[in-house]
Image: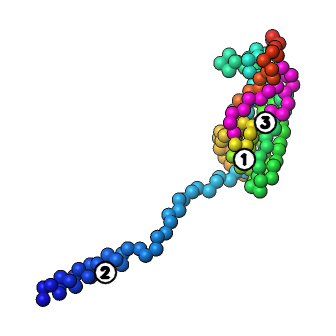
Amino acid sequence: MAPKFVLVALVSVLALLVGAIPTKVSAVTAVTEPAPTYSTISIVGEIFCKSCKLTGYVDYLDASPVDGVLVRVSCFDKNWNYISNYVNSVPGGFFYLSWPDVANFIPERCGVYVDWSPLSYCSKPIYGPSPVGGAELYLVSEKNVTGGTEATYSPGVIYVERERWNVVCPNS
């Protein structure tokens, strides 16, 4: 009689274990945070002429700020339409642009370009590697403003250099 009892007990335990094993395998999906939505997007940066000692020369950069540079910010939107906006740098080499189409702004699909420099001897832009060309945008800050959140993006400092090695920078 004992062997039947042991056999029934083993079958019962096995049935419990098999019942606990899932019959379907389901994939686990990672939980991702939705991309933040902004009410305002600003793009800021600086343009410097590399290796020319002009007004405002900065030793540690070995460069001088350039005003009047035509800067273009171009992006592919959600539908892969190409959108460009332009701004000129001001004294100190700074530029500021407010992106008009906040809903379709995707910074990974944007590049910042130097289209024209007023300095013929310092007009060749230097860009790092970028998937869309030009200088990449990086999120610098987020802050609460009236009506929502403002995001500020920047490519940092964009350098322009001499087009040819034999072009001479003027002395300031």
- The residue under label 3 is 113
Asked whether 116 falls inside the magenta stretch, the response is: yes
Q: Earlier in the sequence, mark 1 or mark 2?
A: 2
Left of 140 or right of it: where is 105? right
Q: Residues within 10 Å of mark 1 (few under 14, many from 20)?
A: some
Disc 1, disc 2: CB below 8 Å?
no
Q: Which secondary structure, mark 2?
A: helix
Image spot of residue 61 (x, y percent): 68, 21
Residue marked by disc 2: 15
Q: Quadrant of residue 167?
A: top right
Residue 87 placement: quadrant: top right
Q: Nearer the viewer, residue 19 or 172?
A: 19
User: Is 31 displayed left or right of 74 in the figure?
Assistant: left
Give, as a three-letter code, the residue at label 2. Ala
Which range of residues does the magenta coloring cover?
114-130
Q: Which residue is mark 1?
A: 109
User: Which one is earlier in the sequence, the residue at label 2 or at label 3?
Assistant: 2
Q: Are marks 3 and 1 in contact (CB under 8 Å)?
A: no
Task: Assign a secondary structure to mark 1.
Answer: helix
Mark number, residue 155: none
